[in-house]
Image: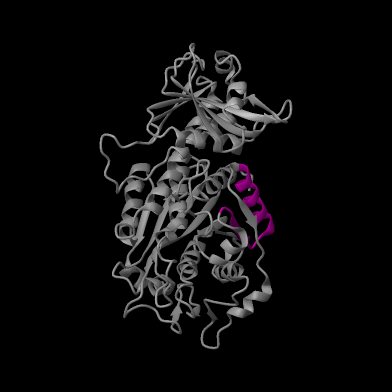
Amino acid sequence: MTALTLSTAGAATLRADALVVGVAKSGKTLVVAPGAEAVDKAFDGLAAVLETLGASGAEGEATKLPAPAGLKAPVVLAVGLGAAPEDGESYDAEVLRRAAGVAARTLTGSKKAAFALPIAAAEDAAAIAEGALLGAYAYTAYQETGKDAKKPLAEVALLGAKPRDKAYKAAAERAQAVAEEINRARDLVNQPPNDLYPATFAAAVQAAGKEYGLKVQVLDEKALTKGGFGGILGVGNGSVNPPRLVRVAYTHPKAEKTLALVGKGITYDSGGISLKPAGHNETMKCDMAGAAAVFSSVVAAARLGLEVNVTGWLALAENMPSGSATRPGDVLRMYSGKTVEVLNTDAEGRLVLADALTKASEEHPDAIVDVATLTGAMVLALGDRTFGIMANDDDFRTAIHEIAEEVGEQSWPMPLPADLRKTMDSPTADMANMGVRMGGGLVAGLFLQEFVGEGIAWAHLDIAGPAFHEGAPYGYTPKGGTGSSVRTLVKLAERTAAGEL
């Protein structure tokens, strides 16, 4: 894991492999961002040099230059910040976060980089730290690493971050904890499904529980059968790796509220008997990204010592076709007692979540949020970078959307149209697991709503788009698992602890 330090050294005097500065566009002119004044002076006008090299200051741009005399670092890396803010205004936190991520990715293989990006407040330092730590991420567990292999940036030194100031110190510590938990979620999503299946996922939760003082309970296939968890069992029936329901809880002695988080944990989704077509299976190890986000968020709450109880429910199963697999037309009796006719075994996430939502509701939390890579329909609606939010309470949905926007995660509030509910009516069972095709993401949300306890505020995050990035890395987002929704869930827990929700 990349180390983070706050430094009082000046940009010209700190020894590092590279010095990161920001450049922005002010009209048609390139300007050097605050924090890099000493570097600008050493170049006798850094902006002019960068313009000669064709730099524009656009977001995502990175330009390496050999450092002139007067700087201790041998390399200067100028990263684009986009349009410069108006006088008196600061750079947006997400702009700083992404720029730091670009820098960290560009400096793969370096031991130490000094970041002289603009810091006007502790929140800016937090954004830069978070972006750099997320940008430095690499998943190399299954790669041979020789002595010449490039490793992620080893140390990030933030300049101008006031290490003796309590606010700056707390901001940096929070950023490191959250970034490390996002990277934990990324690791889980990236782990191949032959090694990450329900039992091994549960074991990883138990190990973290011991490390951070969390209470962990694992229901194996025998306990699930005894308890009547027909949804989770029905999905896992076709696999040699039996399902699990994991409860992981962080409690605080002064907590007045409890937040329950429920995560879809399909460690591999073949579609079951309703087999996915060719070209749709290759990334289905990511179908447990919701459970990974929930798990990491509970650990983050513990590491931050938040005055709120946070309970995570991980509904873990592997959806495979076999002679024992659930068939289209089968009827499952859910943990709630409802019966569900399975019309499509590839609509399995809602089945495992339904059992977990019912179980979570029995503890009467103040609110429940479920997180899932649930529907391709949500990707069609919102694209690859935005998750949808549905809820049984408009104010709660709005609050989560605003929180996501604040922490830099793209989201959009979605409705739960009552008229779509009847499309899940079944002549055989209480309901079917499928409704009309159009608006399929909303139908899935309506299905889940049926299993939420009465009077409990509930929200559903469909992260099918942003949970796994198949393209080239950008900003602080790597190829593969992204850790989507962890920042939103952690901030939600913080707001709940502060009595703001």
Q: Quadrant of residue 412?
A: bottom right
In the depicted structure, whether residue 219 falls above or below residue 250: below
Is 484 on the left or on the right of 203, as rendered? right
Q: Can residue 221 be spotted in the picture?
A: yes
Q: Can residue 256 be spotted in the picture?
A: no
Residue 150 image offset from top left, x and y in percent: 34, 36
Indicate yes or no whether the magenta region holds residue 219: no
Which stretch did the figure color magenta? 385-406
- Outermost residue, top side: 70
As rendered, which of 147 and 120 lies closer to the eye? 147
Q: Assign the N terminus to one quadrant of the image.
A: top left
Residue 497 image offset from top left, x and y in percent: 56, 43
Residue 16 image offset from top left, x and y in percent: 42, 21
In the image, what residue occupies the spot 38% across and 72% down? 233
As rendered, which of 82 and 398 lies closer to the eye? 82
In the depicted structure, whether residue 400 falls above or below residue 97: below
User: How many badges with numbers are in the image?
Assistant: 0
Residue 261 image offset from top left, x and y in percent: 50, 55
In the image, what residue occupies the spot 36% across and 69% down? 224
Indicate yes or no whether the magenta region holds residue 392: yes
In the depicted structure, whether residue 219 falls above or below residue 325: above
In the image, what residue occupies the spot 52% across and 76% down? 433
- Outermost residue, bottom side: 427
Color theme of the render = one colour
Is 360 on the left or on the right of 215, as rendered? right
